[in-house]
Image (cartoon, rainbow, N blue to C red):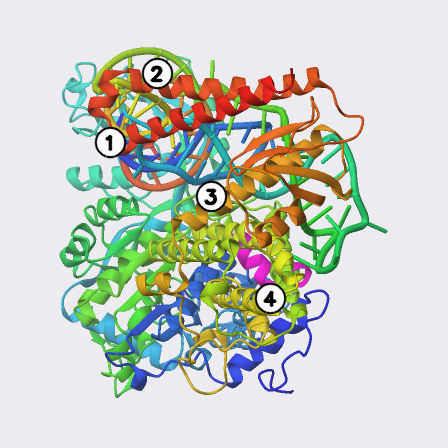
Amino acid sequence: MSDPTTSPTPELAKTYEPGSVESRWYEHWLAHEFFTADPARVSEKRPAYSIVIPPPNVTGVLTLGHVLNNTIQDILARRARMLGKEVLWLPGTDHAGIATQNVVEKSLREERLMKHRDDLGREALLAKVWEWKEKYGGIILQQLRALGASCDWTRTRFTMDEEYSRCVSRVFVDLHQKGLIYRGKRMVNWCPATQTAVSDEEVVSTPQNGFLYYFRLEVVEEPGTYLTVASTRPETIPGDTGIAVNPTDPRYAHLIGKHARRPLPLEDQAPLPIVGDEAIDLAFGTGVLKVTPAHDRVDNEIGLRHGLPAVDVLHPNGKMNALAGRDLDGLDRFTARKKAAELLETLIYADGAPALVKAEPYQNNVGFSDRGGVPIEPRLSEQWFLKYPSQEASRAVVLDGAMRFYPERWSKTYDHWMGNLQDWCISRQLWWGHRIPVWYRKDDPARIHVDVNPPTDPDNWTQDPDVLDTWFSSWLWPFATMGWPEKTETLAKFYPTTDLVTGPDIIFFWVARMIMAGFEYLGELPFRNVYFTGIIRDKQGRKMSKSLGNSPNPLDLIAKYGADALRFGVMRSAPLGQDILFDEKNVELGRNFCTKLWNAARFRQMQGGAIEAEIVPALLTSDDKWILLRLDAAVREVTASLEEYRFSDAAQALYRFFWTEYCDWYLEASKAVLNGPDPARKQNTTAVMDYVLAHTLRLFHPFLPFISEELWHGLRYQTDMPLRQGGDTIMFAPWPKLLLEEERAYFGVDASDEQYVVAKQAVVSSGRALRRDFNIAPNVRTRFVLKPAAPLPDHEVETLRLLLNAEPLAIDGSYLPPKGTPSALTPLGELYFPLEGLIDPAAERARLEKDVTKTSADITQAEAKLANPAIVSKAPPEVVEEFRRRVSEGTTKLSKLRAMIASLE
RNA sequence: GCGCGGUUAGCUCAGUGGUAGAGCGCCUGCUUCACACGCAGGAAGUCGCAGGUUCGAACCCUGCACCGCGCACCA
């Protein structure tokens, strides 16, 4: 392939074709190692900028969420390069334990290679997962290249890389030694679908419609006395080991210490102790609680307080076991629920009535497994837990502002969670993941070996079968990817990282934990700023999901519109802290904008002449000066927006500047000079165009990396010295700076230039409005007469003539219009539209009266303000001055308008 | 129950005290020599409701309503 820098497109093609341009430049950037970070280059003059990618699931494919997230990171990285920083954007993927194992198992089942993972066994299944990972694992990273992501691919990491895995083990061992990791039989969130424990964060509560079953138990010591219990889970009755009431409850207090007969299983209606416990809400249900210590978190605590045993009546897969009794054994928990209710209905007590009193429809919140999609089963099981380290430093760092969250409000959510930390269940009953580095002595399971390395006599030991929660590896990402625990140069130069860009949905899963790990192992925060993106939804506000089919494939969008268009469309509609309603229209807008940019560059190229010639201040027109000032304002606005992470504002400012100010006004106005007789002025105008375009392309580069690079070369710009050797590229062109005072003085620009152009714009829109009022098409050349308030230079007249499509535009200070000539009052004088056959004094009077009405209203409003003594004394002087200006300008305008009306007589 | 967002033009959203804005959509005209993925012009809003502060409120304060999210509770 030819080097694009040595063989630039001689002439820009008529239309922009993103496909070939994008791949060509991406290859070029890679070939020149522009994305590669070198810690050796970091110095005081070249500070480091670093950012680690939130590693996508290794089985994942690119979604719009990734597009949003990674475009932001790319904008940050590319801008940092232009600011002269040494940039490390570190990419990689996450092994995503449950998710990946699910995907692979599903595919193996579909291929009928197994029914259950036990058919294959641990080793064989893991081999299959690795195979899958090698085959499909890189897809999402490839897709990020299509988006233009400037990651340092030479440093791509995977959470199950050998080195990374050793970090995970090392941290486990260390925290175990510190006594922060322990093993215990606890109540955990059990997912019957995936048959593993999950953490509290992986449980999402969802309202469910069910029934509240009221059933009776006979008090053993007082035959004929019944207690009624309200429960949503009658199938767990066989697991009940007690009945609890509030000791202050007058209805039941006297029964404490007695027993109630458990109705199920029918063949073993055991007596249950009635206990008194403060936790019972008198107002809920009947005020009587069945206590099932094995299947409910609260019940478990009550059980512990009263010494009630835990009887597990469920298999790990959610089916009832033998302890549930003959009638329920083997049934799925939901089937068993109905069955249990039926059994209670058939159980007739001595008073002739059934145990079941009623079943009333009831809605309650049920915890669902995030991954498994089924209700969580609270279950007692032996698991590994972590007491979080470095809690206080981690909490303080956000509170005191050393680490900033954008938008700031997430710090409150973070702080709340950090203030209520619960131990983290880190073991998972899966095979895909980091195996827990603990071995049990075969002849003495109480003896354990906890180490990064297996015991030297492995035959005498059995390794813990479980793996660690995926997040137990991800929380080390910012430093485990940089060679920790070695004191690498990368770590020394690039840690802590500068920014983290992620979704607020993983603030607990990932962000908070990384902060704690960072403090615990590097003694420092892992990143300085956290930018939380919004969530991408469809245009109806629904979450993107496969089942709804409302999630467009970004690659299709790139193929259709181009990567830059997708990036720009998404960024322009993604305000800080808000969810984004995705509409393909936005991408279309991005595409249209790229076309506009392309054509504006083509227009410049078609003028020919020297590239980036020196600007001659003496030859600058008012429009030249105006656009230089507008550009300066755009640089200010874009820079400020990016510094505050307001990407959509920056995109919007660029869009507005380039389309409305540069193309719609400046280019059109400049055609007067470009088509004019003076070659020196013409060259000066192309020099101004080069100046503006070269600045604009650089401002655009972080958003539109491909087209900006293509045009940079197509127009042969070389503004200033490249910041890095190895082939010219806009990637390392310096970020535009604001005009210095000396530069403003050199160009001779000041606010009066802006005012003059604003006045010209008013003339043009008045003239165009006159055309509209009399239905004269814009392509018809017609005569205008301007009676100027002050003399106009010839080139200004020519600009106005062009923009009004006037033929001619007569400048005549003593013009005496035929009575009834259509006219408008402009800041540069009275504009007349003398058309044959359109002389109608009455109609013209009416037109002018409309302007009089509006002007009078403006004056009245401003005068009312000034008449209020409170305003004059209390409002800031500049505001009062503004009201005065409105009155005086309005009054002048009014008298001119009246004179015009008078002349109609 | 607690907390956090949101409520501005038909749609999606900017707009943190001084005469209401953009994009899309809509209407009218235009194959004007960069661009019809375009140009010019236009219609369209009691800024969720009610109080309060202020000379002045879309903007600040209080309350309420509705929509969304999170946490807690959930027998």
Q: CA distance from mark 2 to mark 4?
A: 50 Å
Nearer the observer, A136 or A597 = A597
Q: Are marks 2 and 4 on the same chain?
A: yes
- Judged by depth in the image, the label closer to the viewer, 1 or 3, is 1
Residue A566 belongs to magenta span: yes
Instruction: Compare marks 3 and 2 and give the one earlier in the sequence.
Output: 3
Instruction: Compare marks 1 and 3 and give the one earlier in the sequence.
Output: 3
- The answer, for residue A344, to whether it is visible in the render is no
The disc label shown at residue A682, or none? 4
Label 4: chain letter: A
**Disc 2 residue crowd, few under 14, some 14–19, many 20+, Cα 10 Å:** few
Q: Residue beneath label 3, please? A: A329
Quarter holding the N terminus of chain A is bottom right
Element on which disc 4 rests: helix
**Disc 1 residue crowd, few under 14, some 14–19, many 20+, Cα 10 Å:** few
Q: Position of residue A825 (x, y in %)?
A: 56, 30
Q: Residue at x 68, y 27 (%)?
A: A822
The amino acid type, in three-letter code, at marker 3 is: Asp
The disc label shown at residue A469, or none? none
Q: CA distance from mark 3 to mark 4?
A: 92 Å
Magenta span covers which residues? A558-570
Q: CA distance from mark 4 to mark 1?
A: 44 Å
The amino acid type, in three-letter code, at marker 4 is: Lys
Element on which disc 1 rests: helix
- Do the CB atoms of the residues marked 4 and 1 lie less than 8 Å apart? no
**Disc 3 residue crowd, few under 14, some 14–19, many 20+, Cα 10 Å:** some
- Judged by depth in the image, the label closer to the viewer, 4 or 1, is 4
